Amino acid sequence: MSIFAVGINHKTAPVSVREKVAFTPDNLTHALQQMIDELACKEAAILSTCNRTELYFVQDKPLLEVQQRITAWLEDYHKVPASMISPTLYWHHDQQAVNHMMRVACGLDSLILGEPQVLGQMKQAYSQAKAAGSMQMIMERLFQRTFGVAKQVRTDTEIGASAVSVAFAAVNLAKHIFAKLEKSKVLLIGAGETIELVAKHLYDNKVGKITVANRTVARAEKMASAIGAEVITLAQIPEHISDADIVISSTGSTLPIIGKGMVETALQQRRHRPIFMVDIAVPRDIEEQVGELQDVFLYTVDDLQGIVAQNMENRRKAADQAEKIVVTQTDDFMAWLRGLNTQDAVIAYRNQCLSKRDALLLRAKQQLENNKSPDAVIAELATKLTNNLMHAPTRALQSAAQGGELDKIIYLHDVFDLDKKDN
């Protein structure tokens, strides 16, 4: 019985290919049932995100056969040619599969090193597999161990402590300047992807109030509605800027939107309570001279990029620590799995021997009840019991000898202690 991890991700395929083999929540249960019923997987789970689709399963077929069957199934299920899928797939088996799953959960295989979202996605994959009935003892234990490893990495390393996106870095800086964002008011200027990400981080940090200023109000309203923000036009900024503790701007304007004079007026209205300002735009949205004002903390995109670069280096160092944790935990899991296999084999062998013993003992008692000579009964019992116990090892030795399998012969010698001389 082997564990497999098969997948496609942002490193092996463009989004145009990844989207063709993605599973939706609507078809995931059906896909898991097919893996169990049609592909004879003993257990299965599917992780499908924007950056990766991975199949985790337990199978007792040879690797080559598994590769052929899984590739053919993906081709048929998604109606995508195998020639498009095959070059993008990666295959991990047993220890490599366990190691890979743990690295994914820890964010070590992510587009952004150490990102935490994938752990939540793996937990969702686990829950979906449980609901579909495709999660049994081995995968259950593996997922639980994987979640534990991810938690240990987050606790014992700094892999998730440093901001590695401009948007996240801007919010982290705000948290350093304002101890409690819950009481802070924010003015976001623009409605593009970066500002949307900033808005999400601020919302997740429970900031007091968010106002979004944009040239086109309709475009800003969709983003604002999701976070309960107010929307204003760019022309209304002078009326609202004095109310903002934090101003973050990212537009496509060719000229500055916020000038030194506007901020001076706002500071007077605020009685010189500080304003934290971040200008992510290129060209700048906030005049450079604004940074000369007292009570203004102005950061540009270059400042944030420097912070991100340093934080990425910090994450890489933390990732080295995380990799060591993953290796140790992978070894521990594989030791458990080997112990499970050994235990099953021992139990099966003992039960087989006891079953043979009981059958022969019952026959001997019946013979004694029929007045057969006790000596003859004991002699027959001993002979048949010996022959029964010798049969399987003898057959294995003969087969190994006929096939010239020297390693197996040496192994059997060791197992049955055949080289030991009787005293």
Image: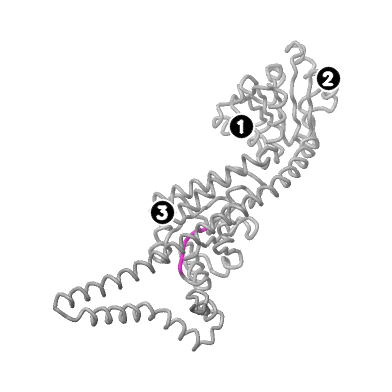
**Residue kind at label 2, given as amino acid type:** Leu
Label 1 vs label 3, nearer the camera? 3
**Residue kind at label 1, given as amino acid type:** Ala
Residue 139 in the image: above or below residue 215: below
Decide: few, some or many residues near mark 3? Use Cα within 10 Å; few <14, some 14-19, many ≥20: many
Label disc, if present, on residue 293 of the rendered structure: 2
**Residue kind at label 3, given as amino acid type:** Thr
Viewer-proximal residue, 33 or 277? 33
Name the residue tied to disc 1.
220
Sequence order check, earlier mark of 1 and 2: 1
| Residue 59 among magenta residues | yes
Q: Please identify the residue farthest to the bottom as the structure is shown.
A: 402
Chain part drawn in magenta: 55-60
Residue drawn at 45 percent across, 81 percent down: 396
Residue drawn at 49 percent across, 84 percent down: 400
Sequence order check, earlier mark of 1 and 3: 3
The location of residue 286, given as percent across then percent down, is: 78, 28
| Residue 286 among magenta residues | no
How far is the residue under mark 1 from the one under mark 3? 37 Å
Marks 3 and 2 close (CB-CB < 8 Å): no
Viewer-proximal residue, 230 or 151? 151
Residue drawn at 78 percent across, 24 percent down: 297
Residue drawn at 42 percent across, 55 percent down: 137
The location of residue 93, given as percent across then percent down, is: 55, 64
**In the image, is 363 to the left or to the right of 422?**
left
Residue 87 placement: quadrant: bottom right
Name the residue tied to disc 3.
29
Label 3 vs label 2, nearer the camera? 3
Q: Secondary structure at mark 3?
A: helix
